[in-house]
Amino acid sequence: MIPARFAPVLFGLILSGLMSCVVSGIATFRALGLHDGFGAAWAGSWMVSWAIAFPTVLVVAPLARRIVAALTR
């Protein structure tokens, strides 16, 4: 079991992985269409996207939390 202090990093890892998977899949489909090499192209796009998305989520999440706190009661 992973210690609770790593929860924010694990959350960022999972969230960025899922979101980059969906977004890169849609972008790859729109750019290339559905063909024999689609899966490989999507996987390549996803890995690059995830490598960028994960650290971005870790940096941007505190700002997003502050904005949400300011917009809610």
Image: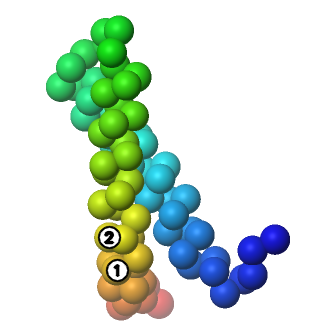
**What residue is at 30 percent from the left and 39 percent from the top?**
45
* Mark 2 crowd level (few <14, some 14–19, many ≥20, 10 Å Cα): few
**Residue nearer the viewer, 2 or 20:** 2
Q: In this orientation, does residue 64 appear? A: no
**What residue is at 47 percent from the left and 53 percent from the top?**
17
23 over 35 or under it: above or below: below
* Number of marks in picture: 2
> Which residue, as the protein is rendered here, is positioned at the far right?
1
63 over 40 or under it: above or below: below
Q: State how far apart marks 2 and 1 are (Cα).
A: 5 Å
* Residue carrying label 1: 59
Compared across the picture, whether 73 is left or right of 2 comes to left
- Find residue 69 and report its image quarter: bottom left
Percent x, y of residue 56: 32, 70
Quadrant in which the N terminus appears: bottom right
Dot 1 amino acid type:
Val
**What residue is at 54 percent from the left and 75 percent from the top?**
9
Q: Secondary structure at mark 2?
A: helix
Circle on res. 56: 2
**Residue nearer the viewer, 29 or 63:** 29
Percent x, y of residue 14: 55, 59
Q: In this orientation, does residue 69 appear? A: yes
Compared across the picture, whether 22 is left or right of 7 comes to left
Dot 2 amino acid type:
Thr
- Find residue 66 and report its image quarter: bottom left
* Mark 1 crowd level (few <14, some 14–19, many ≥20, 10 Å Cα): few
**What residue is at 35 percent from the left and 31 percent from the top?**
42
> Which residue, as the protein is rendered here, is positioned at the far top?
36
Question: Is the C-beta separation of discs 2 and 1 under 8 Å?
Answer: yes
Percent x, y of residue 50: 38, 54
> Which residue, as the protein is rendered here, is positioned at the far left?
31
